[in-house]
Image: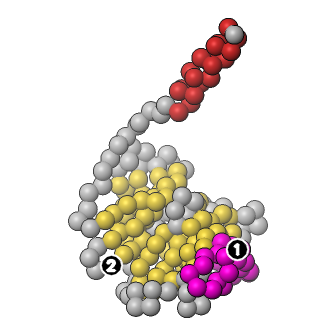
Amino acid sequence: MKSRIILLVSLSILASSSFSQTIYFNKVYDTDNVQNFFMNLVPTDDGGYMGTGQVITTTYRALQIERFDSVGDTLWTKKYFIPGYAFYNGAGMGLIKTQDQNYAQSGTLINASTNNGNGILIKFNQNGDTLWMRQYDGGGYWNDLDQVLQLADGSYILAGATNKYSAGNNIDAYLIKTDSNGNLLWEKHYGGG
């Protein structure tokens, strides 16, 4: 009984120390937009951060890329907007640092007039300048790409959801593989349809 109590107390201490975190900074980034939020954040080589999110106003929905220093101060901000379209960036694993020290962001580009969406992969450099953007056609439906990984050979795997292959309102899991320049190699769907 005594060993069980010691084990329980030890586990409680371990759990509380494992889940407690030190807050190094806490900032609010106030803008004139209706909504402005980040979905993805990755560390940079200099101890700062690269973040991506969305800017939503009464007239557009854009992808926002923002560079922060090590204490969360904004170094620069860039917004990407295409008239007649709305950007939705992938959540969680939607932003990665690439092997060549650039960045890749997955997401969806929605046509405002048809509400159809193409999955997208955008590659940009450390200054937020676009190197390329690829769209993966939803075929009159929508493809949503929420996660991106870069493989050892430089190619990309993207995961999300699609209704391109489904009957009615069914949604399938969706997987895409591209080459290192974002050109589609194959696409697969699972379930639903």
Q: Amino acid at mark 2?
A: Tyr
Q: Is residue 173 magenta?
A: yes
Q: Rate crowding at label 1 as few (under 14), some (14 to 19) or many (20 or more) other CA atoms within 10 Å.
A: few
Provide residue 41's location: percent of width, then percent of height: 49, 55
On-image quarter of the N terminus:
top right
What residue is drawn where x is 65% and y is 72%?
A: 173
Q: Which residue is under mark 1?
A: 191
| Mark pair 1, 2: CA separation | 34 Å
The residue lying toward the viewer, choosing from 145 and 131, is 145
Q: Mark on residue 167?
A: none
Residue reaching furthest to the left: 32
Helix or strand or loop: what does disc 1 sit on? loop
Q: Which residues are magenta?
A: 164-193
Provide residue 92's location: percent of width, then percent of height: 54, 58
Q: Is residue 95 visible?
A: no
Q: Mark on residue 60?
A: 2
98 relative to 155 in the view: left or right: left
Nearest to N terminus: mark 1 or mark 2: 2
Display coloring: secondary structure
Helix or strand or loop: what does disc 2 sit on? loop
What residue is drawn where x is 57% and y is 60%?
A: 93
What residue is drawn where x is 44% and y is 33%?
A: 22
164 relative to 84 in the view: left or right: right
Residue reaching furthest to the top: 2
Q: Is residue 92 above or below residue 146?
A: above
